[in-house]
Image: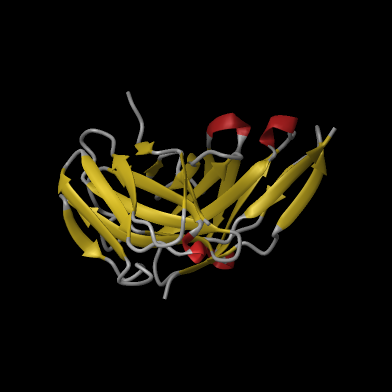
Amino acid sequence: DAGVIQSPRHEVTEMGQEVTLRCKPISGHDYLFWYRQTMMRGLELLIYFNNNVPIDDSGMPEDRFSAKMPNASFSTLKIQPSEPRDSAVYFCASSPTTGGNQPQHFGDGTRLSIL
Amino acid sequence: AQSVTQPDIHITVSEGASLELRCNYSYGATPYLFWYVQSPGQGLQLLLKYFSGDTLVQGIKGFEAEFKRSQSSFNLRKPSVHWSDAAEYFCAVGSRGGYNKLIFGAGTRLAVHP
């Protein structure tokens, strides 16, 4: 069974450019989470969806960040315009059902470098 | 509010030695507890989870963890560490209120000396 798939694995771009990160959750999982990992701040939850609906976006750092989930098999995290401080590893995770007892399954992440 | 504390940022052990990674949580009821491992350049992989029942849970790769309610702890253990266990380990707590949201600790980076 395929795991969570993220693309691209690495992205290097210049400040001010738009960046789009993509995620395909595990089939049948109805929760999707976006995280950011940095040395300074550790693992931060940015936003999560349930049945394609955003539930909590309080972790999104600024209006420059936006996330969408147009269908059950695809989500994007967009940064526009990008800044050097956005450099981090971004993870997508998915989990099935509800109740707080289902573990999250993580993708391998996108390593983003903003020059 | 829920929180997770991993007191040790870095731990170094010799190959073959035993290992214990500490995790303390703050939660008003019996939480769901998880340990994840992250190898360099990879995502987080679930090692084990505790929901209820037996307080000693077994996981993958020879790891186990013990839930101690009186100490609000969920420490991860392995009797004999292998060089391939070098990675970062994250403890996490999940709420019983739904939505599968997890609160992660800051992580413990494990180095293994040959």
Which of the pair A115/B106 is nearer the observer?
A: A115
User: Where's the N terminus of chain A, which quadrant?
Assistant: top left
Residue B98 rendering spot, x and y as whole percentages: 25, 59
Number of marks in the rendered image: 0
Q: Residue furthest top?
A: A1
Work out whether residue B67 can be spotted: yes
Residue B48 rendering spot, x and y as whole percentages: 49, 41
Q: Residue furthest bottom?
A: B1
Q: Residue at x 65, y 54 (%)?
A: B108
Q: Residue at x 26, y 42 (%)?
A: A96
Task: Name above or below for residue B94 compared with residue A32.
Answer: below
Snapshot quadrant of residue A15 = bottom left
Snapshot quadrant of residue B22 = bottom right
Which of the pair B88/A102 is nearer the observer?
A: B88
Q: Is residue B109 left or right of residue B35?
A: right
Task: Name above or below for residue A114 compared with residue A22.
Answer: below
Residue B50 rendering spot, x and y as whole percentages: 45, 48
Task: Name above or below for residue A38 compared with residue B47.
Answer: below
Residue A101 rendering spot, x and y as whole percentages: 33, 50
Q: Is residue A103 left or right of residue B33?
A: left
Snapshot quadrant of residue A44 = bottom left
Q: Residue at x 43, y 70 (%)?
A: B2
Q: Is residue A38 left or right of residue A24?
A: right
Work out whether residue A103 can be spotted: no
Which of the pair B99/A39 is nearer the observer?
A: A39
Q: How is the image coloured?
A: secondary structure
